[in-house]
Image: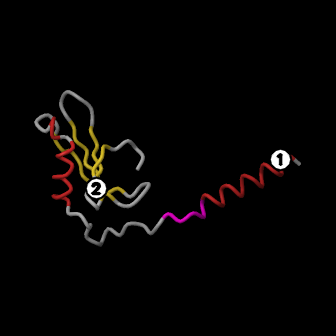
C-alpha cells in the first residue's frame, strides 16, 4: 500500500513538472533582437579590467533556463574561462550556470 502511494505521488510530481510551460523554442531563422556586435561590446565591459588578458573564443545564443541570450566565452593564457551572458534587453552578468 505504501508503494502505491509513493508511485502515485511520483507520477503526479513528474506530470506536474512536465506539464509546466517552457515557452516556445527559439527560432534560429529570426534575427536576434540584440545584434552580436552590440552584445559583444556589453560583454567586454564586464571584463574591462582584464581586457588585455582575455580574448573571446566563442559566441552563441543560449536558450537554456530562460529567454534566449548571447553567451560569450573569454579565455586568458594564465587563468580559466570567463563566460558572460548578455540578455537581449542588454543586461549582462557572469554565467554561473543558472539564470
According to the picture, the residue beneath numbered tag 2 turns out to be 70
Along the horizontal axis of the image, is 41 left or right of 69?
Answer: left
Mark 2 or 1, nearer chain start: 1
75 in the magenta segment? no
According to the picture, the residue beneath numbered tag 1 turns out to be 3
Q: Give the range drawn in magenta.
A: 18-22
Q: Which residue lies furthest to the left in this view?
A: 52
As displayed, is residue 98 above or below residue 26? above
Give the residue drawn at x 50%, y 63%: 22
Corner quadrant of residue 97: top left
Give the residue drawn at x 15%, y 40%: 48
Q: Where is residue 73 in the image (x, y as percent from the top left)?
A: 25, 44
Corner quadrant of residue 51: top left
- SS category of the residue bearing label 2: strand
Give the residue drawn at x 34%, y 44%: 95
Along the horizontal axis of the image, is 77 left or right of 80?
Answer: left
Front residue of this view, candidates 77 and 82: 82
Along the horizontal axis of the image, is 62 left or right of 65?
Answer: left
Q: Is the magenta stretch mostly helix, strand or loop?
A: loop
Please tell me whether mark 2 or mark 1 is closer to you in this view. 2
Q: Position of residue 16 (x, y in %)?
A: 64, 60
Along the horizontal axis of the image, is 24 left or right of 43?
Answer: right
Amino acid at each position: 500500500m505504501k508503494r502505491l502511494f509513493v508511485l502515485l505521488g511520483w507520477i503526479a510530481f513528474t506530470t506536474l513538472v512536465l506539464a509546466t510551460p517552457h515557452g516556445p523554442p527559439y527560432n534560429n531563422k529570426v534575427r536576434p533582437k540584440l545584434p552580436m556586435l552590440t552584445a559583444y561590446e556589453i560583454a567586454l565591459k564586464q571584463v574591462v579590467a582584464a581586457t588585455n588578458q582575455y580574448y573571446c573564443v566563442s559566441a552563441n545564443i543560449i536558450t537554456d533556463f530562460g529567454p534566449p541570450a548571447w553567451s560569450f566565452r573569454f579565455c586568458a593564457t594564465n587563468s580559466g574561462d570567463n563566460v558572460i551572458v548578455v540578455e537581449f534587453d542588454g543586461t549582462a552578468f557572469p554565467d554561473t550556470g543558472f539564470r
